[in-house]
Amino acid sequence: VQLQASGGGLVQAGGSLRLSCAPSGRTFSSYAMGWFRQAPGKEREFVAAITWSGGSTFYADSVKGRFTISRDNAKNTGYLQMNSLKPEDTAVYYCAARDYWSRSYSPEREGDYDYWGQGTQVTVSS
């Protein structure tokens, strides 16, 4: 399964963007979806995650109160609404999906995701 991330772009500081993530090729069900980002010269880091059925959400401290993760079960699509964007939010944003529930699932752990999207660039100008 290939995930398709979209919605990135160039925005001024204080602006908003909404990223979308959907599977391409065929529909599939997943347990959870996560968003990660990688800024130039830095390691990829966790941004937010949501469980598909219960809608539990998780956020990195750096985006709490500014970003909102959500999902549309009917469309099998996940979203990341990003408000009050800052230059330090500039990065390539990746969506990821996990197939099944596990007691050991950790939203922040990259290895707990089974599928990844290609990334979408978000650039925030000051």
Image (spheres, rainbow, N blue to C red):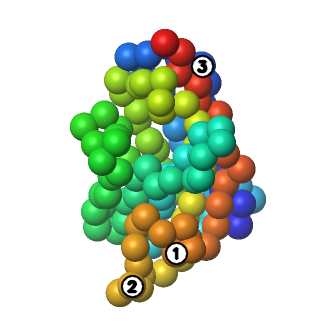
| 64 versus 46 height, above or below | above
Q: Quadrant of the N terminus?
A: bottom right
| 13 versus 60 height, above or below | above
The CA distance from mark 2 to mark 3 is 37 Å
Q: Residues within 10 Å of mark 3 (few under 14, many from 20)?
A: some
In the picture, the disc for residue 78 is none
Q: Could you tell me residue 126's position as x and y percent?
A: 49, 12
Instruction: Compare marks 3 and 1 and give the one earlier in the sequence.
Output: 3
Circle 1 residue: 112
Circle 3 residue: 10
Image side of residue 47 versus residue 3, left or right? left
Q: SS for tag 3?
A: strand
Q: SS for tag 1?
A: helix
Q: Are marks 1 and 2 in contact (CB under 8 Å)?
A: yes
Task: Say which residue appears at 48% left-offset and 61% top-offset.
Answer: 33
The CA distance from mark 1 to mark 2 is 9 Å
Q: SS for tag 2?
A: loop
Of all residues shown, which one is farthest toward the front? 41
Q: Amino acid at mark 2?
A: Ser
Q: Could you tell me residue 13's position as x and y percent?
A: 44, 16
Q: Could you tell me residue 108's position as x and y percent?
A: 43, 64
Q: Is residue 92 visible?
A: no
Q: Amino acid at mark 1?
A: Asp
Circle 2 residue: 104
Q: Is residue 24 visible?
A: yes
Task: Say which residue appears at 44% left-offset and 42% top-offset.
Answer: 80
